[in-house]
Image (cartoon, coloured by chain):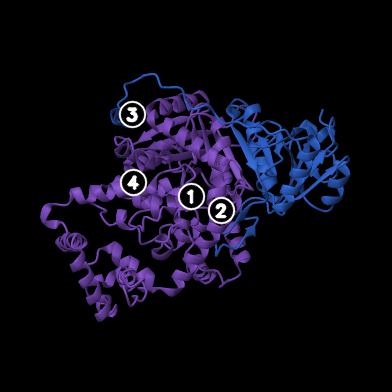
Amino acid sequence: MSRDHILHRVRTALGRSPSQPIPDPPPARIRIPEVSLDARVASLIAQVEALAGTALETSDPRAYIASAIAGKTVIACNSPYLAACGISSLPGVESGITDREQLRDACATADIGITSADYALADTGTLVLLSSPAEARMISLLPPEHIAVVSRERILSGLDELFSILPNPAEQSSSMVLITGPSRTADIEQILVRGVHGPGRITVLVTEQGLRP
Amino acid sequence: MPSEFQQKARETLANANLQLAVFAATGRLKEKRSEVVGAGQLPDYQELRTQANAVKQHATDNLDHYLELFERNVAARGGHVVYCKDGTEVSDFILALARERGAHLIVKSKSMTTEEVDLNERLEHHGLESVETDLGEYIVQLAHQRPYHIVAPALHMTRYDVAEIFTRRLHVPNEIVIEKQTALARSVLRQKFLAADIGISGANFLVADSGAVVIVENEGNARLTTSAPKIHIAIAGIEKVIPRAQDLATFLKLLARSATGQLLSVYTSFLSGPRRPGEIDGPDEFYVVLLDNGRTRLLPDKNKRQSLFCIRCGACLNTCPVYRRIGGHTFPWVYSGPIGAILTPQFMGVQQEPDLPFASSLCGACGEVCPVKIDIPKILLELRSDVKKAETRDKQNRLEKLGFRVFAWLMTHPRLYEMAGKLLRSVGVPSIQAGPLRAWTSQRDLPPLPERSFREMWRRR
C-alpha cells in the first residue's frame, strides 16, 4: 500500500528522517475560569434556552418527567442514575435494552429518549455524553425529543475544564459526543429549521447535588 | 480569449438572482461570525488564533511523527488506518471492503475531502448506492452539482430550486415550505440510515494522542452515519492531525464561531475505534483513510505549507469581495474563495490554474478573519510570482510590460506627466471606458476628474 510511500514523501519534504525526535509542542492552552456552582447552573440554563431548548433545575425530576411523557412512547438509557431517580421505572418507559438491533428499533419508534449526561458545559449550554453499557448512542439521537438529566456538580465551566478532567476521552469510551441545543440546519436560504436528523426538542433537567449515587 | 474561469465569472456576474442569493447568504454568515468573535464576546479571540496557528505549525512541521502516532493509537483501540495516495486508491479500498462484507448501501456525511476525489461517482460507477445525508449536500447530490460553499453547499439555491429538484428526483408533490422540505429529506434519509451497511464520514480533526476522529456538525447526520451502520470509514487529508485532545479546547472554540457564528456546533463527536465490549451500539469496524491526493506537494515550501493549516470554516469565502460576486462554481475545483485560490493552484500546479492567484483584490480581509492565521494574501502574491516565472518569455503580457514602462517614464518626467494629465482631463473619462481597460471599467464607476490637478492648485494657492 501507499503508507511507506506517503510517509517517505512527507519526510523528504520536511527534511526529516524516520523516528527523528521532534521539538516540544507548544503547551496546550487550558484556562479554567473560577465560576461558582450557582453561576454555572444559571449559565447552563440560559444558554440551553437561548438555543430554543428547555432547561430547569428541579429536586424532583421523576415528577417532571412523569407529566412530560404522559401518553408518549419513551426509551430511557440504562444509567443507574436514572434508575435511582425513579425515572426508568415510570410507567410507559422502556429501559434495560442491551441488544443493538432491539435498541435501534425501539429508538426509531419512540417519541422521547431519556438519558443522563456525564457532564454539562455552562458557558455553551452543552451536554457531554460518553457511550457505555449504561449510555447508548441512539437514545439521544433517533427520537424526535431528548430529555437529559444532569446533576448539579457535573456542570463544568466549559471546554477547558472538560479537557482537563478528560485529557484523553478515548480512554473512557469509543464515543464522546457534545450536544449543544436541538439538531438544526440552515441549508436552504439560511432559514433555521430544527430537528433535521437528530431531536428537534431538547430538555435539560438539573438535579440537586448528592442525588447522583 | 477569456479563460473558462473568466467566462464563468462573467456568467455569474450577469445572473441577478444568483448575485442576490450569494451576496445575501454570505453577508448573513459574515455578520453572525463578527457577533461572536468581538472583544465583548470572546476576549481571548486573538490569543486563541495565535495558539491555533502555533499548534498547526508544529503539527505540520512534524507531520510524519504525528501520523505515525495517530496510526498507533487507532490500532491500539481496534481500528485500522489506511494510507491512500489518490482517489483511485480510496475507492479501491472501499470497493474491496464492500465486496468482502456484501455491502450495497452507503450513507455519507459531509466531507470536502471526498468531494476532491468524486467518491460518490466512483462508488456508484461500481454499483454501490452512496447517499449524501447533510441536507445541503443531499440537495446538490440530487441536482448533480458540486457544493457551492465549503460550509453551506446549497447556498446558491432558493426554496423553489429545491422544490423543483425534489419533485424531479424524488417524485413528490411540489413543496415550497422549507420546514416541510426538511421533514421530507429527514424521512427519506432516515430509512437509508437504518438500512445502510457502511457509513462514510469526513473528519474535522484527527487527534494523535487519542487515535480519535473528531466530527463537527449541526444536523445529526454525521452521528447517524458514524453510529448506525456496522462499518464506519472516516476519510481525512493527512494534514488534519493535531497532537492532543486538549488542543480541541482551542480549535473547537474557533471553528463554529468562524463558520456559522455558533459558540459550538450542535454535535461534536469524538470517536476512537469500534464499539467496545459492553457498549450497546456503534460500529463493529472502524477505518480511517489518510489521503494525500497532492498534499505532500505543499510541504517543501516552508512558508506556503501553512496553506494546509486550513480548518474549512469558510470565513474567508464569506468576507471575500471576489467570492461574494463570482460565487463558488466559478472556481475550477471543490475549494472556492480565497482558500481555494491558494489551495487549487498548489494541488494542481500553477500552470494548470494561472487565473486563481489573480482572483483577489488583495484587500487582506481573508487573512484577518482566518481563525488559524493563514497569511492568504501573502501566499496569493507568492503564487502570482510563481505563475509569472512559469510563463515562457513570449507568453508574458507584452502590453502589460509596455504599460508599466510608459508609466515609469511618465512618473520620472514631471512636465510630461502634467501634460498627460491635462490631456486626459480635456478628453474626459469616457475615452478610457472603452478600449483595453474595459474589463475593469465595465464593473466600476470612475470618479469624475477634478478640474485642476493638485499641482495646479498648489501653484495658485
Mark yes or no: residue B123 visible: no
Specify the subunit that label 1 lies on. B
Residue B192 image point, x, y percent:
55, 52
Q: Are marks 2 and 1 in contact (CB under 8 Å)?
A: yes
Which color is chain A depicted in?
blue
Identity, as a three-letter code, of the amino acid under mark 4: Ile
Nearer-the-camera pick, A77 or B84: B84
Above or below: residue A167 compared with residue B335? above
Task: Measure how far apart labels 2 and 3 are at the Cα level.
Answer: 37 Å
Q: Which residue is mark 2?
A: B33
Disc 3 marks a residue whose amino acid type is Leu
Q: CA distance from mark 2 to mark 4?
A: 24 Å
Q: Amino acid at mark 2?
A: Arg
Secondary element at tag 4:
helix
Image disc number at residue A7: 3
Do marks 3 and 4 share a subunit? Answer: no
Q: As displayed, is residue B376 above or below residue B56?
A: below
Colour for chain B in the figure: purple
Disc 3, disc 1: CB below 8 Å? no
Q: Residue at x 64, y 48 (%)?
A: B40
Q: Earlier in the sequence, mark 2 or mark 4?
A: 2
Q: Which mark is residue B379?
A: 4
Per the image, the residue denoted by label 1 is: B369
What is the chain identity of the residue bearing mark 2? B
Q: Nearer the viewer, residue B417 or B86?
A: B417
Work out whether residue A34 or residue B66 is closer to the camera in this orientation and state it.
A34
Label 1: few (<14), some (14–19) or many (≥20) C-alpha neighbours in 10 Å? many
- Chain at numbered mark 4: B
**Label 1 sits on what residue type?**
Val
Report the chain holding disc 3.
A
Q: Cα distance, mark 2 to mark 1?
A: 9 Å
Q: In the rendered structure, which disc, 2 or 1, sits on the residue that comes first in sequence?
A: 2
